[in-house]
Amino acid sequence: MPEVLKAPLVVEFPFTRSLGPVQSAFLTGLRERVVLGVRASDGRVLVPPAEYDPVTAEEIRDLVEVAPTGTVTTWAWNHAPRRGQPLATPFAWALVRLDGADTALLHALDVPGADAVHTGMRVRIRWAEERTGAITDIACFEPYDGEPPQLTGATGEFEDPVTGIVAAARLDYTYSPGRAQTAYINALGGRRTVGERCPSCRKVYVPPRGACPTCGVATDEQVEVGPRGTVTTFCIVNIKAKNLDIEVPYVYAHIALDGAGLALHGRIGGIPYDEVRMGLRVEPVWTEGGRYPDHYRPTGEPDADYDTYRELL
């Protein structure tokens, strides 16, 4: 049996969002070394500020400045910081209730070791040298035994307010496709497409899954399918994806390869986007050294009859 493949995989999505008046004031304040909370209907000052009252669900905008000093309410030690975390050396994740606030803010606490942090200890904000209007403008918290500094009197009105942020969500992990998909990927390297047939319902799954999700039985009979197939459904993409060198508009389709029991995804090329249609017969186009088809193009055959692929929609 060939070795099962595995590879490091990164899933990353830069999420762009606009800010309402409360979050805009909060992040712009951080840029100016000011911490703002918001007063709720029950009189509590919430930091970080919420846009809607946690009791009444009404919109709240009564901004309140709080001190950059506070008290640790609880903490956990991080002995091995990961990529993108606030500090490169071991630190404590701490919930800090800033002076003047009634809720706690989560951030990093820079101390030499776990024995140097305790619930109730006094801390202050260490500001980042370069600030852009983000939570990272607070570099971390650090121990502090002095008095709270005098407030600035900020009301939330700032020049050049921050109106939007980009939050990068990222997941790093090692992916193993398993026995069935390892065989599928290895076959693609030879420009072949193989699936596996269910011994019960006889459906051929491409890509293979190692088991039939309908019958619940293992699959191990390999079946070569395609290379030609039929467009079952499709969509026209009009928004250009980052780092994807494909001009819009283009067509992404479900393609039922000949002999397969379900459709797989593929890009359609070699034809104007507005001429792609259900039933179009297509074949794969491989690039030099490519391990999978770059796209599918029309074969020139007559369109497939609807009844031949309606069960694969």
Image (cartoon, rainbow, N blue to C red):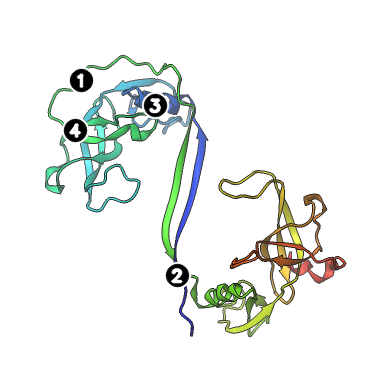
Residue type at mark 2? Lys
Say what amino acid the circle numbered 4 marks: Val
Three-letter amino acid code of the residue under disc 1: Pro
Judge the density around disc 4: few (<14), some (14-19), many (≥20) Cα neighbours within 10 Å.
many
Residue drawn at point x = 61 percent, y = 78 percent: 215
In terms of sequence position, does the residue under pointer 3 or pointer 1 come before the other? 3
Observer-side mark, 3 or 2, equals: 2
Badge 2: residue crowd in 10 Å (few <14, some 14–19, many ≥20): few
Q: Position of residue 225 (x, y in %)?
A: 69, 77
Q: Secondary structure at mark 2?
A: loop
Q: Which residue is mark 3?
A: 26
Type of amino acid under label 3: Phe
Q: Give the labeled residue for mark 1.
A: 149
| Count of numbered circles on the image | 4
User: Which residue is label 2 attached to?
Assistant: 6
Residue 126: which quarter of the image? Answer: top left
User: Is 272 rendered above or below residue 161?
Assistant: below
Nearer-N-terminus badge (2/4): 2
Of labels 3 and 4, earlier in sequence is: 3
